[in-house]
Image: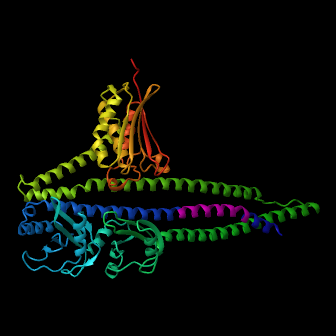
Amino acid sequence: MSLRGYLLWLVLVATLPALVFSTWLIYKSADEERTFRKAEIEDTSEILARDIEAYFQQSVASLEVLSVSGALVANDLRAFHELARRLLKNHPEWANIVMVGPNGEHLLNLNRPYGMPLPPLARPDVFQESARLRRPQVSNVTEGVTLQRLLTVVVFPVVRGTQVKYVLGVAQEARNWEAFLNSRLPQGMYATLLDREHTIVARTLHNERYAGSKPVGTFVDALTRDPKRGVLKGPVLEGFEGYGAYRQIPFSGWTVSAFMPSEAVEGPVLALLAQLGAGFLLLMATTLVIAWVLGRQIAAAIGSLTASMHAVGKGGYPLPVDTRIREVGEANQALENAAELLAGRLSREQAARAEIEAADRAKDEYLAMLAHELRNPLAPVNAALFILAEEPLSSEAARRARTVLGRQAQHLGRLVDDLLDITRLASGKVELQREAVSVGDVLRQSVEDHVELAARAKVDLSLDVPAQPILVLGDRTRLAQLAGNLLQNALRFTPAGGRVTVSLERRGGEARISVRDNGVGIEPDLLGRIFEPFVQGRQVGARAKGGIGLGLPLVKGLAELHGGRAEAFSAGLGKGAEFVVTLPALQDH
């Protein structure tokens, strides 16, 4: 083999590892992009399920306030018809309000003047079921008798004493759900909403064609395996492949899915691989040309040297020899340095991108939680204000409306107080009014304050403190806030029939407060971040609807402000958790 051939092989061997390494880095980056898109689809299905659940709860709250209006309490259906008609105008998303007797007789329909004959109900079964169970219900999608369009109905039983007096229902056109879903979807993503019978209520892609029909194929198989939640990949109704995730909505039993065409998920990956292939071919062609040129120069230098040696052998003068072999070695070293630089740069870019994506997801989750927590009280507040404007201030309806306003105002106040406290702690503006405080007294008072909450949640709450007082130099109010946050957190994450134990002991020169529960536990990857703001674990049952993730950060901040520390322990999901706060104790006298 000629020197030029050896040089070509040398260039190939030196270049190939760098190309393979670059290919691996780009493939890893593409795989991370695919994983991010799938996680985004799952997050979107969770957000849609929460939003639809909140909408149903708001509708039920509005019907509950309407059920205690003076006209309905007095059984004045004509006055109630007029009151309901005015309320309907304030809810453009509602198509109708109807009222049914406990035995299914059709009493009132806002699409017909009062006193006129009423058409048969589209779904009498949902009204009868609500009356039988004495709780709100959501119907499956059905075709309205009057409107001749697909409808869904939310119903609420009106109980007087021990009997169901009426059943109120609010109907919404199924096509309105398309706009509801579209307003909450990221660009390039689609959604499908199914009722309990897995009939399509609405769809953001070709809704007019598929509303009222059944899904097919992979989606049906996934729902059969697990009707509550899942992820899938397969053909959608239009025939193209897609990635999807679905979640069941607890209140209604409906299912919402978010999906994205495979092309949108894998398109960037294929584009990266195509760019890599083109770059590889271009680099190889360029490298071979350079190697051929350098080979010519080296061969020419050796030929010149050979000619000079022949010239000297014949008694002549040596000829000039122009060789660049050292520069070839330096170029190879520069190539190796460039590969190392590329690897380091790609690694830093991936780390920075992961941090940005994590921060962006945390921001979106926090804004979504905060928006839900601040928005949920508004529907009952608006309905209560409407009743106050329509009813005498001394009426039972007005009293109930004022109770609703007070409860929701307290809820909003607690949210704002938590946000202000976490901001003051972060900026160092919390000042403690220090005095000698008995930690046992603080815990007794906090447990007493939460006995009723524990009873409602059917959780056994116990306290174990020593007879000898343990004193700390601290702010009694802030210590009570710390204990209350720990108790509320334990009760929220402990299911009915569970147990929460609060204990206190002295260990050396420290007071050790422990709040232990046998609830849902903490995931291992969440345990290290549990005291960070806006971080929450899996919640339980009907109480899985409150808080914006600030209680435990406040505990940590207040403990450190008192010179102590806060720690969390858990063996994993389903194995309970223990939160421990340690504070410097005063010497016994």
Decide whether residue 17 is among the magenta residues.
yes
- Position of the N terminus by quadrant: bottom right
Give the number of marks: 0
> In the image, is 387 to the left or to the right of 413?
left
73 versus 126 height, above or below: above
463 versus 19 height, above or below: above
How far from the left and from the top, in percent, is residue 26? Answer: 57, 63
Image colouring: rainbow
Q: Majority secondary structure of the magenta segment?
A: helix
Residue 422 location, quadrant: top left
- Position of the C terminus by quadrant: top left
Q: Residue at x 35, y 67 (%)?
A: 185
Q: Nearer the viewer, residue 481 or 319?
A: 481
How far from the left and from the top, in percent, is residue 32? Answer: 52, 61
Q: Nearer the viewer, residue 32 or 138?
A: 138
Question: Would residue 478 be seen by someone viewing this image from the given angle?
Answer: no
How far from the left and from the top, in percent, is residue 510? Answer: 44, 28
Residue 420 location, quadrant: top left
Q: Residue at x 15, y 80 (%)?
A: 119
> In the image, is 102 to the left or to the right of 75?
right
Decide whether residue 446 is among the magenta residues.
no
Question: Would residue 318 be seen by someone viewing this image from the given angle?
Answer: yes
> In the image, is 522 to the left or to the right of 66?
right
Q: Nearer the viewer, residue 45 or 228?
A: 228
- Residue at the far top: name it: 589
Q: Which residues are magenta?
A: 12-31
- Residue at the far front: name it: 162
